Structures are given as C-alpha cells and as structure tokens.
C-alpha cells in the first residue's frame, strides 16, 4: 500500500466527524496519530482565524520534545492544517496545548504569518 493510500484515510477521518450546521461547524475538530496522540479543538465553533487545539499524548510525553521538533511540526501542525484547510480555509493561526496524564507538558503555536513554523515551549511538570 502506498504512503498516500495510508495517509489519506487518516486525514479524511476528521471530515466524517464534523457536521455542518448553517455557516458554522457544529462539532469539535478531531484528529490523531495513534498510538501517539489524539487531538481535538478546544471549542466546538472552531472554524475561524485562530484555532486552539488540545493534544493528548497517549503513550508518553516524549512527542513534545523538542518543543519545535519535526514530529510536532509534521504530525500536529502539518496534519491538522491539511485537513482544516479543506474544511475551514480561514484558519491563520493554530495554538496548541499538549497534555499527558492530565498535566500540561507543552504550549506552542504556528501561523500563516510565520510560514506555519512551530514555536513552542516545553513545560515539563
């Protein structure tokens, strides 16, 4: 199976979980990279210029190290942007909070203004 054939269903899953309601999306934006993390928008009316995402590490907090690392850039920012761009092209900034076992481990953001480069702080408890 080609890489695109494996990635496409993972990118399209959030499309199935969102239900349009008038001009706004009535459900949370959800995405994941199992078994590493699950992600969800903080608000149900998430489609706007700035979107806040809550990422929950499922195995350990190492996905948040380093705070601007390739994994977060590719799998969190890249993946969420790819799907959000199809559903809500107004998004200009993504803020991310990273959690593990109920504790905040990460805070960061990426924006169109900064060419979607991730800027983050690792805040180990």
Image (spheres, rainbow, N blue to C red):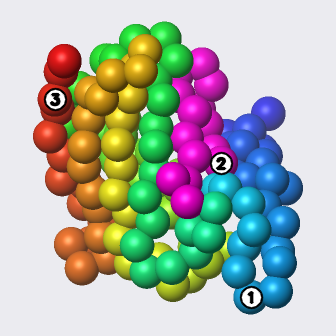
Q: Residues within 10 Å of mark 2 (few under 14, many from 20)?
A: many
Residue 13 lies left or right of residue 101; in this view the side is right
- What whole-number distance in Å separates the C-alpha atoms at marks 3 and 1? 37 Å
For marks 2 and 1, give the one nearer the viewer. Answer: 1
x, y percent for residue 24:
71, 80
Q: Residues within 10 Å of mark 3 (few under 14, many from 20)?
A: some
Who's the residue at 18% across and 21% down the image?
A: 124
Magenta-colored span = 30-43
Quarter-of-image position of residue 65: top left
x, y percent for residue 58:
52, 18
Who's the residue at 64% across and 62% down the image?
A: 44
x, y percent for residue 20:
82, 74
Predominant SS of the magenta segment: strand
Q: Mark 2 highlights which residue? A: 30
Who's the residue at 40% across and 73% down the image?
A: 50
Q: Quadrant of the C terminus?
A: top left
3 and 2 marks in contact (CB < 8 Å): no
- What whole-number distance in Å separates the C-alpha atoms at marks 3 and 2? 24 Å
Q: Nearer the viewer, residue 125 or 91?
A: 125
Quarter-of-image position of residue 12: bottom right
Q: Mark 1 highlights which residue? A: 23
Q: Would residue 32 be visible to someone looking at this image?
A: yes
82 versus 35 height, above or below: below
Q: Nearer the viewer, residue 13 or 29?
A: 29
- What whole-number distance in Å separates the C-alpha atoms at marks 2 and 1? 19 Å
Q: Secondary structure at mark 2?
A: strand
* Rendered image: mark on residue 123: 3
């Amino acid at each position: 199976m080609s890489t695109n054939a494996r990635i496409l269903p993972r990118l399209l899953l959030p499309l199935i979980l969102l239900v349009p309601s008038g001009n706004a999306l009535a459900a949370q934006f959800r995405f994941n990279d199992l078994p590493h993390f699950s992600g969800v928008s903080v608000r149900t009316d998430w489609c706007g210029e700035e979107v806040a995402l809550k990422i929950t590490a499922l195995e350990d907090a190492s996905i948040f190290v380093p705070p601007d690392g390739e994994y977060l850039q590719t799998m969190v920012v890249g993946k969420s942007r790819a799907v959000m761009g199809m559903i809500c092209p107004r998004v200009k900034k993504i803020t991310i909070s990273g959690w593990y076992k109920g504790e905040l481990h990460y805070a960061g953001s990426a924006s169109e203004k900064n060419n979607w480069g991730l800027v983050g702080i690792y805040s180990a408890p």
